[in-house]
Amino acid sequence: MPEFTARFATPAEIANWDAHVTANPNGGNILQSEAFAAVKANYGWKPQYLAIEGPAWTSYNLVLEKTFPVLGRLWYLIKGPDAAAVEDVPGMVAAVRGFVRRDMLNVFMLKIEPDIVDSEAARAVLTGAGLVKTFDLQPNDNTAILDISPEENQLLRNLHSRGRNAVRRAIREGVEVVPVEANEANLRTMFELMQGTLAAKSTNQLREYAYYRSFWHEFTSRGQGHLYFVYEDGRPAVGAFVINYGRKATYKDGGSLQNRSQYGDSHLVQWQAIGDMKALGAVEYDFCGAPPAARLKDPTHPHHGLGLFKTSFTKTVTDFVGCYDLALRPLKYKVWMAAGERIFRQLYSRRTGHQFY
């Protein structure tokens, strides 16, 4: 097993954080970005910037930290550690454990969620390192990912026939996708479109508007976020917010009016965004959330409707391993699991009105 060491990133590394993260072995993730760190800093988390050094590469990982009375600090390596392979993860978390102990950082548990494709073998490696499977937190732990590296005609042929036919029909019928400024009026409209879509197609709950406004602002202000509308009868009928981050692009948020006459408009928005993200250097496009592959056709799953739409582009779903915990202070971790997490989540939500994670 490769040996790793861990440390806090230097000020110079933090100043160029996104460049380091997107050079990670697995290409990083938008939830490890400078923009996302700025969002979470206003929602109860303290961003920490961690460098995990191995024999061939250094992995830069955003850590979200919360501190609790008596227990100490919880470290959430969101979408990390970024590893070349699952076999690297035990050594990487061991390095973090050693760093915490050596520098007396009072961290009682690590929560990790590496973008490692789920398999029985991968799960065996993680549990063999003392990691404990827990509930997943991010919508793209199960997701649809499209390879957008082929040239345009081939890429269109690669789509599922449902998506390809919808794109072609929308183009024939003159549907127009408009990149728009992320101003207050457009962001409010985008949020309203999302509310309508989730009410019709999902049992999930949206966060409050202020959270999305902060999220969208942080990414657009860095040139990484892009807002698209399709108009019908003079008003926005479909909206999408897409992020380019290194070699990856992510369809983060979307919404639409439920009674529309333009066929294929929501597909054409994606097709336009895919082309734009490819021009910015992306080679894969993450549709950010779907049912697990085994439940793709299950109408009771909360992401069923969204999954049908997203797999009209990609055909398949990628399942990642999701969240695992590592107890650094076993007794404190037992307290956390028995009642601490539930109590602190309830207190935080009552006090702020926001989601804990």
Image (spheres, helix red, strand yellow):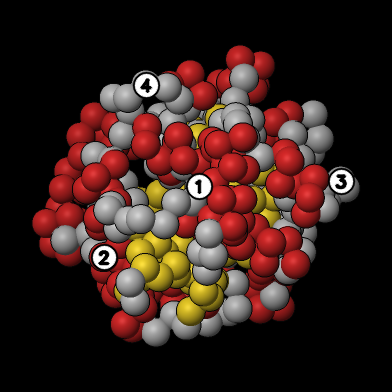
Mark 2 vs mark 4: which is more N-terminal?
Answer: 2
- Marks 3 and 4 sit apart, C-alpha to C-alpha, by 44 Å
- Please name the amino acid that badge 1 sits on: Cys
Mark 4 vs mark 1: which is more N-terminal?
Answer: 1
Q: Find disc 4 in the rendering and name its residue.
A: 298
Query: x%, y% of residue 270?
Result: 56, 56
* Residue nearest the observer in this picture, 154 or 342: 154
> What residue do we see at 28% from left, 41% from top?
202
Under tag 4, what secondary structure? loop
Mark 2 vs mark 3: which is more N-terminal?
Answer: 3
Q: Find disc 1 in the rendering and name its residue.
A: 288
Mark 2 near mark 1, Cβ–Cβ under 8 Å? no
- Answer yes or no: is residue 125 visible: yes
Circle 2 packing at 10 Å, graded few (<14), some (14-19), many (20+), is some
Query: x%, y% of residue 118?
Result: 59, 25
- Marks 4 and 1 sit apart, C-alpha to C-alpha, by 18 Å
Q: Find disc 2 in the rendering and name its residue.
A: 192
- Marks 2 and 1 sit apart, C-alpha to C-alpha, by 20 Å
- Please name the amino acid that badge 2 sits on: Glu
Q: Find disc 3 in the rendering and name its residue.
A: 55
* Residue nearest the observer in this picture, 237 or 347: 237
Mark 2 vs mark 1: which is more N-terminal?
Answer: 2
Q: Is residue 167 above or below residue 158?
A: below
> What residue do we see at 41% from left, 64% from top?
239
- Please name the amino acid that badge 4 sits on: Asp
- Marks 2 and 3 sit apart, C-alpha to C-alpha, by 49 Å
